[in-house]
Image (spheres, grey):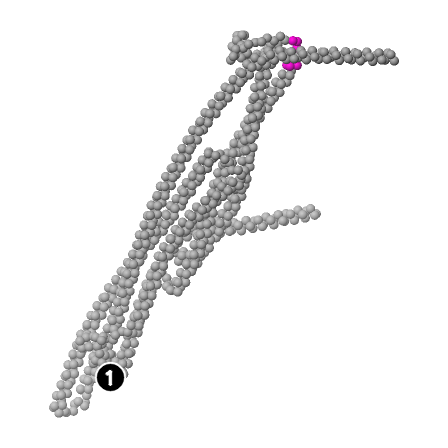
Amino acid sequence: MSNTSLQETLLRTHELELMRVIKIKDGEIQRLQALVNALRDGSTDKVKTALFAEAREEARRGFEGERSRLQQEIYELKGMKRQMEEALNLAVQADKTKAAEIRSVYHVHQEEITRIKRECEREIRRLMDEIKVKDRACCVLGKELGVQAGHTQRLQLQKEAVDEQLAQIRSREAGAGGHLHSPKRDAPYPSGAGDTSESLVSNEQQLDEKDARRFQLKIAELSAVIRKLEDRNALLSEERNELLKRLREAESQFMPLLDKNKRLSRKNEELAHAFRRMENKLRFITEENMEMREKVATKRRPSSLNDLDQSQEEREIEFLRLQVLEQQNIIDDLSKALETAGYVKSVIERDMLLRYRRQGSIGRKKAIRPCKPVVETFFGYDEEASIDSDGSSISFHTDRTPCTPDDDLEEGMIREETEMRFHQLTMEYQALQRAYALLQEQVGGTFDAEKEVKTREQLQAELILYQTRIQDLECVLSQQGQDMKWIEEKQALYQRNQELIEKIKHMETEESRLKNEFQDARDQNELLEFRILELEERERRSPGINFHDIHFCEGISPLQVYCEAEGVTCLSVDGSAVCLILSNLSNEEQVVAIHARTVLTLAERVVIFSTTYISKGCFKIFVCLNASLHVFSKQKGYLDEELDYRKQSMAQAHKRILELEAMLFDTLQQDAGAKMSEMLSDDERETLRRAVEQWKRGVMMELRERDSQILRERMDMLQHSQQVRGWSW
């Protein structure tokens, strides 16, 4: 027991002694370590401060140089910005002046066109007045021609009556001569009775000879009058032909004026289109200028896609409003042109109808107007002389003696009057037929008033229909113009996306380069830390070192002092690297190298911090660019969908236009649209024909594609059924 207890007590005392010695040794080690650390820190403070000051001065110089370079770049960018703004202002002013010049030219052309329109209307009215005056003159000459023809016919009838009376008188004289030589006359008469009979016969012969001479004179006078009337009729027909020729010349002069009016209206439309294009270009340039100014002034991005869509919708609404105003102006111009053409056409048709009605009313008046009978008198012909006179033509024509009863005389007069009226009506009918033939020659076909009215109503209905179609086509064209605007906006966005993609690629390459540099710096830092740990361990294991304080002048580095002391002017990198190996250095040199490495470590940390800050900034820029790229990708998808929809609508509208042109061509090929087709030019007909052929080709291509699709589906079904059948086998 005693041995064990003694052993335990000895063990305890030994342990206590060991613990005390260990504590003493630990305190001594800690004291020595603190002393070593204090000596090491006190000796390297100046080197450390000098190196740190040198590094800070170099960093400050680099920072100042970088700042001056950046300030110079900022000044250059400001100058470039100022130059760009000046160039933009000059371009805007040039566009404004060009637009003002175009506007002034447009107004001048408008005034010239209005002046030419007024002159054309004035010339048209003058020509229409001349046509009306010549038409009246033609009617008056035709009327006089009809009157002279009736008078000539009456004289011809009177001549025939006189010839018949002469024949009767001659036959009577021949009968009287035969009676004088008859056997009854050979009987003897008393002398007194014979003288009286001879005197009576001689008196009768003298009267007959006087009547014959008088009738011959009258016949000569009538033939002279007939010749005069025929000459006058020939002159009147020549005057009428001359007037018709002048009328055709006036119409031929009138048609070039209409053609000139059409050409001027077409030129006016082209100028209006050019003016609108320049206005659109000016508006786009002003919008781009405003956008650039807003970007330069605020550099504020849209908060969301909705704001961008709202701004785009506002621009679209403004553009559509301008398009509607332009289309309204075009429609007004077209309606004015159509009103002018309709006015000219209505005036021509009204004149033709008035001419036709006037000729009909003249014929009716001539048919209703009673003709006065021409009565023969001793002194000549008198229309108002008494019908009961002895030498009247009716008495001679009806072969009545002065003892004819009044009833027979009235019947003869009525019959004569009826025949004269019938003859006059036939003459008027022939004159109307001639006028109708001339009217047909002028019109260029058969003229039917009711048919013309129906045709005019049908043409007016077709005109209204085509006007509605024109409006639809103009709406389609405006939508096509809007589609072109969408295409231009999409192209601009595509270019902007390409620029952003290029910037993103450049930033990615820069980021990869910075990452590589950062990784290299991190690897070097790790190597330096590992080497520092090795040096610290080696220093800890090495014997004590007596450090000496070394004072350096300001602005001189320790390396410079060492080089001056050693008399070295040129350093070899390989040799310096070999010399800087710690195993080849003395203790002081090792301490200097260690301090230099610590300074380099601090500088490396500064570089790493700046690199991390730059990488963070690049990462933020990259995130912003990714967000903007995402937004632009959304916008691109939306614009692609909108473009596809616009393309489909434009294709449908183009197909509809081709169908309408085909319908118009078919309508013009029909009999009802023959006159409308005559109004079109050869180029317009050829354009319509090409449009119809293109529409037919499109329809045939669609049918072929549909048939080929059906054939492919059936072939696929057949192959599938064969495969299923093969699997079942």
Q: Quadrant of residue 220?
A: bottom left
Q: Quadrant of residue 382?
A: bottom left
In the image, 665 versus 72, the foreground residue is: 72
Q: Is residue 608 left or right of residue 485?
A: right
Q: Is residue 577 visible?
A: no
> Which residue appears at 63% of the width and 49% of the height?
718
> Which residue appears at 47% of the width and 45% of the height?
317
Split into 4 quadrants, where in the image is the N terminus?
top right
How far from the left and from the top, in percent, is residue 595? 59, 14
> Which residue appears at 62% of the width and 11% of the height?
39
Vertical comparison of 531 with 648: above or below = above
Label 1: how many Cα within 10 Å (few below 14, some 14–19, many 20+): few
How far from the left and from the top, in percent, is residue 170? 20, 80
Task: Find the magenta span and give its range.
Answer: 535-544
Q: Is residue 190 left or right of residue 714?
A: left
* Residue at the spot of label 1: 404
Magenta highlight on residue 103: no
Magenta span: predominant SS is: helix
In the image, 655 versus 215, the foreground residue is: 655
